[in-house]
Image (tube, rainbow, N blue to C red):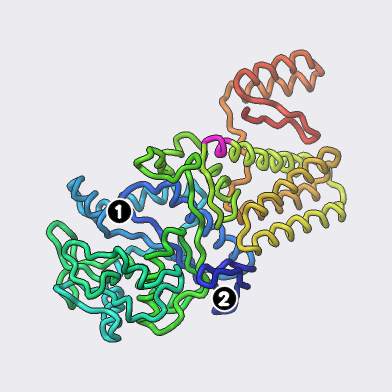
Amino acid sequence: MKIYNTLTRKKEEFVPIKEGKVGIYSCGPTVYNYFHIGNARPFIMFDTLRRYLEYRGYEVTFVQNFTDIDDKMINKANEEGITVAELADRFIKEYYIDANALGIKQASVAPLATHHIKEIIEIIQALIEKGLAYEVNGDVYYSVSKFKDYGKLSGQTIENLREGARNEPGEVKRDTVDFALWKAKKEGEPSWESPWGEGRPGWHIECSAMSSKYLGDEFDIHCGGQDLIFPHHENEIAQSEGASGKKFVHYWMHNGFININNEKMSKSLNNFFTVRDISKEYDLQAIRFFMLSSQYRNPINFSRELIEQATTALARIKNARLTIERIVETGEQIEANSDFATKLEGFKQAFCDAMDDDLNTADALGVMFELVRETNTYFSTNNGIEDAKAALQLFDELMGVLGLETKSEQSAPKEVLDLMEKRQEARANKNYKESDLIRDELSKLGYVVEDTASGPILKKI
């Protein structure tokens, strides 16, 4: 497998540090609200990365954190008259509701920043001892100019960063580009004891502490959105490598931005959507399909028209699978076709080739539609159970890698199911006129019936 490494700006052969094992750290949400459609993209794409690596036989430790203390959380909690911990608890639960609907597996470890104050303090102390950090009035800052490799991920230079940089109110930094590791206690904020007095951690240090605890000082893959390259991930490198003296991460993966109707998503443009908002209109599996329809590094444009297209495309795959499932249930027990089996193996290889090329889910979905065409054609004239079982297994296997549900639910109102039963009786009695009338009634109710060699299939229009 080849991965585009943001650090080296090229595709590289993926070679894990430990044979057969992969450690991944993916930046999770700040839990002060429902997560938005822009957050959903990295959650979906890097969940798919994890699924694919597991499919290829790796033992994956997937760590995705929750940032449960920062300025936004403090402000929101104060507005609502609750504690920051209560706010975090509420929106962590809400995160899992939406994430589950998007087909996102729960992380191997889902650490909270506030549960790792001890580890955060230990890293800060190590940085101070090495001369890479300093304390001023209870605040602790990282001395950016002391870390010679600063800017290697983002391409930023310290000189350019100094232009226009300034200290925020209350900050007493030696250099305007230095960033906070620890913030002294302020009125109305949660705080913890530290060697520098009561306070709370800065944002960047949290991920250095949590990743090193669960994956070690050096691990395989760190991923997130492009907006995190600078300053967040750049600062993580400075903190982690400064404290440990080891190479922090071997492969950095970043997904492209999402535009809404060809415009940047922002609250000021009134085009800011949470996943919870979208779930009121669309099946979130269609949202996942939409995200996978573009290679993760490319920008992607979100619009209702494109989501409706994704809904239709996903239904096409489900319907193809349903046809095959019917044959498994009602087909003929005949010898499997070796030529068909060879074709199925070819689709599997093509799918893996696409995923091995820097997680190219767009091409992988293209293979799925080739598989749909092949099986639709093949099973229009073949009714073998063994062939159908092999095709069904491949559908479920590959769609499982993509985190997409394959089963097409045939749940329908009792009225519709009763009409289906009457139509079957009419056809059994060769009363085709009545059968056609019932078909028309079903159409008015929003359903269409397709008669196949393995029996009728009911579909929602």
Left or right of 168 on screen, residue 327:
right
Q: CA distance from mark 1 to mark 2?
A: 35 Å
Residue at the image position 59 percent from the left and 78 percent from the top: 19
Q: Is residue 95 visible?
A: yes
Is residue 305 within the magenta segment? yes
| Quarter occupied by the C terminus | top right
Q: Is residue 61 something that shows in the picture?
A: no
Pinpoint residue 215: horizontal percent, then vertical percent: 44, 74
Reading the chain from its start, which is encountered first: label 1 or label 2? 2
Secondary structure, mark 1, is helix
In the image, is 40 to the left or to the right of 135? right
Q: Which residue is mark 2?
A: 16
Q: Which residues are magenta?
A: 304-308
Is residue 376 rendered magenta in the image? no
- Spot occupied by residue 202 in the image (x, y as percentages of width and height): 27, 66
Residue bearing the label numbered 1: 89
Give SS at disc 2: loop
For the residues carrying marks 1 and 2, which lies nearer the camera in this image?
2
In front of the other: 270 or 288? 270
- Packing grade of label 2 (10 A; few <14, some 14-19, many >=20) is some
